[in-house]
């Protein structure tokens, strides 16, 4: 999505794409990314805009499960990120809530906060292996 606000992306199966699966680019604000499956993509779910909700998704076998880049005020909750290289990855993203996610068997990092990511809240996540 680009230049798209107040959309709901729900109940999709996005698997085996050569690039990214579900993507929001700035300015695409106030979107709901809910109850999707992203399997075997480069990036499962990529959030590149502010004020979005990413909830109840499954990201499995991707390079990046959920990648939040330049995306402030995002909520990432109740997702399953398994067997990716990076489960949940933030880059230059502030005021992000990461809560109640299950992050399992990711090879590089379960939850990773990179440069210029500040004022984020991580709570009640289940990080396994």
Image (cartoon, rainbow, N blue to C red):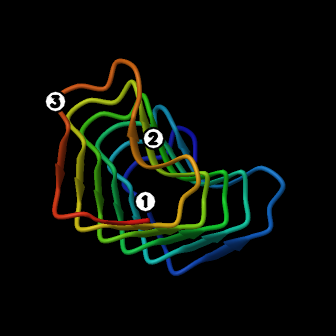
Of the pair 67 and 122, the residue shown nearer to us: 122
Badges 1 and 3: C-beta atoms under 8 Å apart? no
Between the residue at mark 1 and the residue at mark 2, the CA separation in whole angstroms equals 9 Å
Of the pair 51 and 37, the residue shown nearer to us: 37
Residue 127 in percent (x, y) is at 34, 63
Badges 1 and 2: C-beta atoms under 8 Å apart? yes
- Left or right of 102? Residue 64 is right
| Residue identified by numbered label 2 | 28
| Residue identified by numbered label 3 | 119
Specify the quadrant of the image occupied by residue 40: bottom right
Residue 16 in percent (x, y) is at 80, 68
Q: Nearer the viewer, mark 1 or mark 3?
A: 3
The local crowd at label 3, few if under 14, some if 14 to 19, many if 20 or more residues have their Cα within 10 Å, is: few
Q: Nearer the viewer, mark 2 or mark 3?
A: 3
Residue 15 in percent (x, y) is at 73, 71
The local crowd at label 2, few if under 14, some if 14 to 19, many if 20 or more residues have their Cα within 10 Å, is: many
Specify which label sits upstream in the sequence, 1 or 2. 1
Specify which label sits upstream in the sequence, 2 or 3. 2
Residue at position x 31%, y 26% in the image = 117
Between the residue at mark 1 and the residue at mark 3, the CA separation in whole angstroms equals 26 Å
Residue at position x 34%, y 18% in the image = 116
Query: The C terminus lies in which quarter of the figure?
Result: bottom left
Badges 2 and 3: C-beta atoms under 8 Å apart? no
Q: Is residue 37 above or below residue 25?
A: below
Q: Secondary structure at mark 1?
A: loop
């Amino acid at each position: 999505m680009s230049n798209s606000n107040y959309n709901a992306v729900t109940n999709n199966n996005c698997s085996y794409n050569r690039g990214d699966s579900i993507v929001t680019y700035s300015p695409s604000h106030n979107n709901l990314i809910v109850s999707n499956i992203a399997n075997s993509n480069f990036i499962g779910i990529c959030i590149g805009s502010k004020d979005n909700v990413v909830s109840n998704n499954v990201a499995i076998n991707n390079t990046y499960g959920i990648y939040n880049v330049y995306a402030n005020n995002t909520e990432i909750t109740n997702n399953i990120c398994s067997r990716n290289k990076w489960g949940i990855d933030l880059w230059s993203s502030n005021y992000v809530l990461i809560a109640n996610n299950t992050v399992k068997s990711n090879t590089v990092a379960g939850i990773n906060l990179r440069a210029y990511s500040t004022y984020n809240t991580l709570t009640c996540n289940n990080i396994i292996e």
